[in-house]
Image (tube, rainbow, N blue to C red):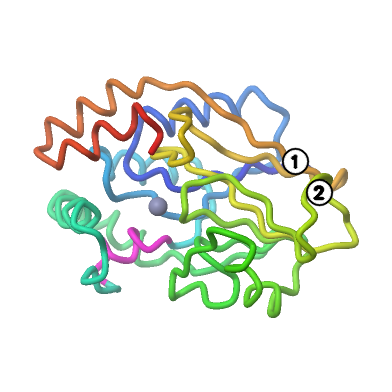
Amino acid sequence: MKIALISDIHGNLEALLAVLAQIDVMNIGGIYCLGDIVGYGANPNECIEVIRSRNIPSVAGNHDKAVAGEISIDHFSDVARRGVEWTRSRIITENREFLSSLPYQRQVEQALLVHSSPDAPETFRYLFDQEDTWESFNVLKSSVCFVGHTHRPAIFCEDGDTQILDPRKRYIINVGSVGQPRDGNWRSCFAVFDSEQFSVNFIRVEYDAEAARQKILNTGLPKKLADRLLAGI
Ligand code: ZN
């Protein structure tokens, strides 16, 4: 079976709809979301409503829990904090409760889904490089774990070799970001996992980033949050 993994939508409705339209024309059995549906972008309610209406199972991201009021934003960057505060002021009760209900992890066949790292999903630790993943591989029981959080697509293998996925080894795969890519490519990113072939593909999708940018400018949020969409940083 093929499944699509999407993550870090961050209230970017234009990006989310473009990604879902792409997934809809592919032969894919299910869509799963790895969290951070909200924060930074101008359409938090609309993005949650798309995820809810399409019954896309999701796990909780740090921004989702922050907007739900369940984690502190003291250690968030200034722009992240402002994004959370603005989103809190706009989110309707029903959607805030939805964010609050999201679990920290889900298991889908042989794959574990978490937002940040499998060793302590509720601490939202970042896995930027191989060295960051050792603690995760120490506890990982699934053959593959999908994560988001850094907004950068990546494949980490327990032995460092990531050229071709080997079903005898374990992997942590970052699926990139739908709504705020940070790998220098402004196009939305998601991953397709084929559980029979044990293969993963990263797909990039063009969307109306200028429209999403303009909406952020209209909210009064920092200009940096708007401009970064065009640069993919
Ligand atoms: Zn994020």
Residue under label 1, please give it.
2
**Residue displayed at 25% across by 55% down:** 80
Kind of residue at badge 2: Ser
The answer to whether residue 146 is left or right of residue 37 is: right
Q: Position of residue 6 (x, y in %)?
A: 54, 44
The answer to whether residue 152 is left or right of residue 91 is: right
Q: Position of residue 175 (x, y in %)?
A: 58, 46
Asked where in the image residue 157 lies, by quadrant, the reply is bottom right
Q: Is residue 76 above or below residue 12?
A: below
Q: Depth check: give the residue in front, 92 or 133.
A: 133
Residue under label 2, please give it.
195
Kind of residue at badge 1: Lys
Q: Position of residue 141 (x, y in %)?
A: 75, 74
**Residue displayed at 48% across by 42% down:** 177
Give the residues in magenta: 61-69
Identify the mark nearer the N-term, 1 or 2. Answer: 1
Q: Is residue 48 above or below residue 171?
A: above
